Amino acid sequence: MQPFSTHAGLVAPLDRVNVDTDQMIPKQFCKLLTREGYGRLLFFDWRYLDGEKPNPEFVLNWPRYQGASVLLGRANFGCGSSREHAPWGVLDYGFRVVIAPSFADIFYNNCFKNGILPVTLPDAQVEELFRRTEQHIGYRLAADLPNQTITDDFALKLTFEIDPFRKQILLKGLDDIGMTLEHKAEIAAFEKRYQPTATMYDPVDVIISEPSK
Amino acid sequence: MYEKIWEAHLVHEAPGQPALIYIDRHFIHEGTSPQAFAGLKAESRKVRRPELTFAVMDHSVPTKGRELPILDKDAALQFEALARNCRETGVRLFDMHSLNQGIVHIIGPELGITQPGHTIVCGDSHTSTHGAFGTLAFGIGTSEVEHVLATQCLSQFRSKTMQIVVDGKRPRGVTAKDIILAIIGKIGIGGGIGHIFEYTGEAIRALSMEGRMTICNMSIEGGARAGMIAPDETTFAYLEGRPFVPRGQGFQAAVERWKTIASDPDAKFDARLEVKAADIAPQVTWGTNPGMVTSVTGRVPDPGSFSDSDQQKAAARALEYMGLKAGTRLVDIPLDRVFIGSCTNSRLEDLRAAARVVAGKKVARTLKGALVVPGSRVVKAQAEKEGLDKVFREAGFDWRDAGCSMCIGMNPDVLPSGERCASTSNRNFEGRQGKGGRTHLVSPIMAAAAAIAGHFVDIREWDVDLEA
Ligand code: SF4
């Protein structure tokens, strides 16, 4: 995973609450076998008209937001399906930072597995960022993870909270499977004590009958 | 209950770090697992406990003509990949020809793989379903699937807990689906973020396991990571005799263990919500998320009636997408299709209830299609034994093979653009059942009645036997 320390870039506003992962990567594209190539598919149904023609009404297609790498969202961002295709798409499109008043749990988690910085800010501050993005063409924000700040070119400086452990994961681009495997001995000790099993007492692939009422 | 299960599975904990918890059961399906296996391979890592992972093909399987070659090339590649990965690693697979195949959240409980006190994960957000058995069960991303395969553990931060008490008796015609939709309507789809729900109260205790699974299934739609219900006699009776459940003395011992899982009477929760079952009417969603819901007796709301501007905008956009006018009575909304299926509502009890509603009647002529998709092949076989397939067929429904089907439209069962569907599934997001498709979430009996009438009806006004 690509580490994350600081990032500055053009902001794109997505002024909708409850943006769900079904919209980020529609299910027809969840049949691919790789983790790459989802950027072209991000927000597919909103972004394209028939024949994959860009829909001029969708905000990411506006000329002023081309090349954006900071995504500004609304409450409950990333709700719905657990699909990691959604953050894969967000990253592959070019976004490194997503800012919103709140995130759905699974999406938030998935961001840290993929080197995306999710920033939670109070409603009023997000509102202000939307205002500034609209007001200034070419509006940029800089995210500084070590100092936990968001700044713009107009002397705005906001601080954000982030769990210290998750911060380290992003800063170092850690592979968390590798980290867990450092506790191999503890896992083995747990298994010895706990004896996990999944014993089958009846052969399956024989139709079992449901009790009738 | 959450804390008890958590403590019992703690492998490692250090201040300021997420805890490492052991995973009892890991379910995988063709959609979110290929990249996880590929990741393992790339690092030459092994599956630690293959016997604790169970695989099934459900999301993209066709619901008819399954013996024919799969025409969707991408889906076929996914099936092949899953079969190969399971073969190579020793994970048990219920492939699409298995007699036990079905939607992952249906077959886990049905086979008794899901048992009280377990930690259960799956690369699918509706893993919360399994919480109905008093388990800690939640959806994970593909990177975490890889993590569980490699370590049989997951690093997790503790969640907060919310107790949801549903008091009193459920009125006639009001199902588990209506209870959970009403709860989501109250708290909103982000209301449970960061929380695990524990449902309790007279109306919950009175529910069958099927009903409890419906409730827990949709916890994620209220923003919660998981939902859980304490195991009791209903739970034990359901589990007894299932293929993966111990027998005889082993069963008795298991029950004694399971009895200790329930929350203590003085357990503390971070939040609490009380709902009166008597106040709940059959629910119908009008918008593009499950929280945009109202009683069948209601009307499509005016976006202006919402308090904050985000909600007003969202409602206005939803009405536009749904092709609805504010003020329209819900019972006046005409339908194009009806779908009875999905991990929310495709168990035997759901099909029996829907069949009682349609028995001897005909699907409205104005409907373009009505589909019944059993949640598993076991459900299908039992339903056929009881003659339910005939009841549905004679009424004009299509009777299909088991899978996710039109809940998500990853197989050929897609809702065409612009068409309106009454669906027993759990998500009505834009394009969920097919690009441009318009979904209204309802209970199985409400869907069945809507199929007959061609529009929504208040099932309470029908003179049919609703509770068998
Ligand atoms: S039935 Fe629908 S919600 Fe359930 S697992 Fe399948 S696609 Fe997901």
Image (cartoon, rainbow, N blue to C red):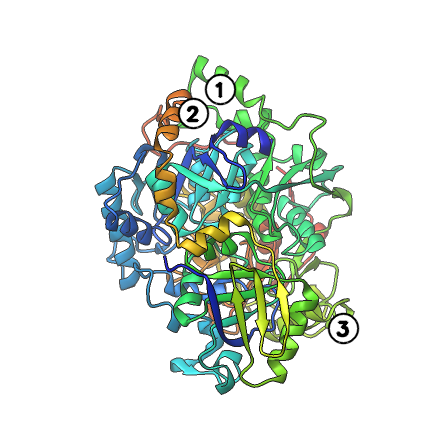
Point out the image quarter for the C terminus of chain B. top right
Residue B407 on image: x %, y %: 48, 57
Amino acid type at mark 2: Val
Task: Tell me the tag on residue B254.
Answer: 1
Q: Relative to the observer, which residue lies in front, B229 or A43?
A: A43
Q: Relative to the observer, which residue lies in front, B381 or B149?
A: B149
Mark 1 Cα-neighbour bin, 10 Å: few <14, some 14–19, many ≥20: some
Residue denoted by label 2: B245
Q: In the picture shown, does residue B60 fall above or below B465? A: below
Whether callout 1 and callout 2 share a subunit is answered yes
Residue denoted by label 3: B304
Q: CA distance from mark 1 to mark 2?
A: 9 Å
Chain of the residue on which disc 3 is drawn: B
**Would you say the beta carbon of the disc 3 residue lies within 8 angstroms of ligand 1?**
no
Residue B38 on image: x %, y %: 27, 52
Q: Residue at x 52, y 64 (%)?
A: A144
Q: CA distance from mark 2 to mark 3?
A: 54 Å
Residue B429 seen in render: yes
Q: Earlier in the sequence, mark 2 or mark 3?
A: 2
Chain of the residue on which disc 2 is drawn: B
Residue A151 on image: x %, y %: 58, 71
Rendered image quadrant of residue A19 = bottom right
Q: Earlier in the sequence, mark 3 or mark 1?
A: 1
Q: CA distance from mark 3 to mark 1?
A: 55 Å
Residue B436 on image: x %, y %: 50, 72
Mark 3 Cα-neighbour bin, 10 Å: few <14, some 14–19, many ≥20: some
